[in-house]
Image (tube, rainbow, N blue to C red):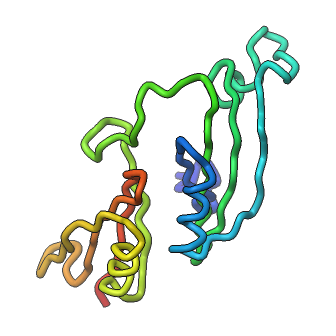
Amino acid sequence: MNTNPLGIRRLDHVAWSVAQMAPVIAFYQRVFEAQILYRIGPVDAAQLPRQADGRDWTEAHLGIAGARLDLVLLGLPGGIRLELFSYAGPASATSAPLPGNHVGSHHLGIEVDDMAAAAQRLRDNGCTVLERIAFADGPTAGSQFQYFLDPWRNILELVVHGR
């Protein structure tokens, strides 16, 4: 029995769509010391050759017809790569990220050395930091978890595993 039928090596990146690229990049550079690994764009489907089946490039490759977008890949400490998309069109159906209980919602969990210090840095930089979670027993005994929202309400989580 093949226990890795897709040949998975590792998680490569996490991607979010953001309304405005510049302030999000500045925040992640300031708070996480993120580095810009590369930028692509602006990309405009109307300026690219159509596919043989008639679809435009962004519909064929991203599932969004007629898109105009910019893309930036950020490198965060610990090898985390965060890909940001900013669409100039078509317009988004929502103006904020999905709440955690919405189907399709997501969060990014980040293991840290010091939960209290990390949470304070986030608070100091405009994040909404929720209450810490810790269980005395069960499968996560000794571990700590603390969710936070960045200034654009993207959901992230600090994690300290039990030692």
Horizontal placement of 92 versus 12: left or right?
A: left
Q: Is residue 59 left or right of residue 100?
A: right
Determine the image quadrant of residue 157: bottom left
Residue displayed at 64% across by 61% down: 9
What residue occupies the far left of the structure in this picture?
136
Q: Is residue 10 left or right of residue 150?
A: right
> Of all residues shown, which one is farthest toward the top?
54
Residue that appears at 68% across and 70% down? 35
Query: In the image, is 99 to the left or to the right of 51?
Result: left
* Position of the C terminus by quadrant: bottom left
Q: Position of residue 103 (x, y in %)?
A: 32, 36
Where is 7 relative to 157, above or below?
A: above
Q: Where's residue 87, x and y in %?
A: 62, 34
Tally the marks.
0
Determine which quarter of the picture holds residue 13. Answer: bottom right
Q: Quadrant of residue 66?
A: top right
Q: Nearer the viewer, residue 162 or 38?
A: 38
Front residue of this view, candidates 124 and 145: 124
- Residue at horizontal 42 percent and vertical 51 percent from the top: 152
Query: Residue 53 in the image: x percent, y percent?
Result: 78, 9
At x 61% / y 41%, what residue is drawn? 86
Q: Where 83 falls versus 93 (above or below)?
A: below
Q: Position of residue 159 (x, y in %)?
A: 35, 75
Give the vertical position of 127 relative to 155 (above or below). below
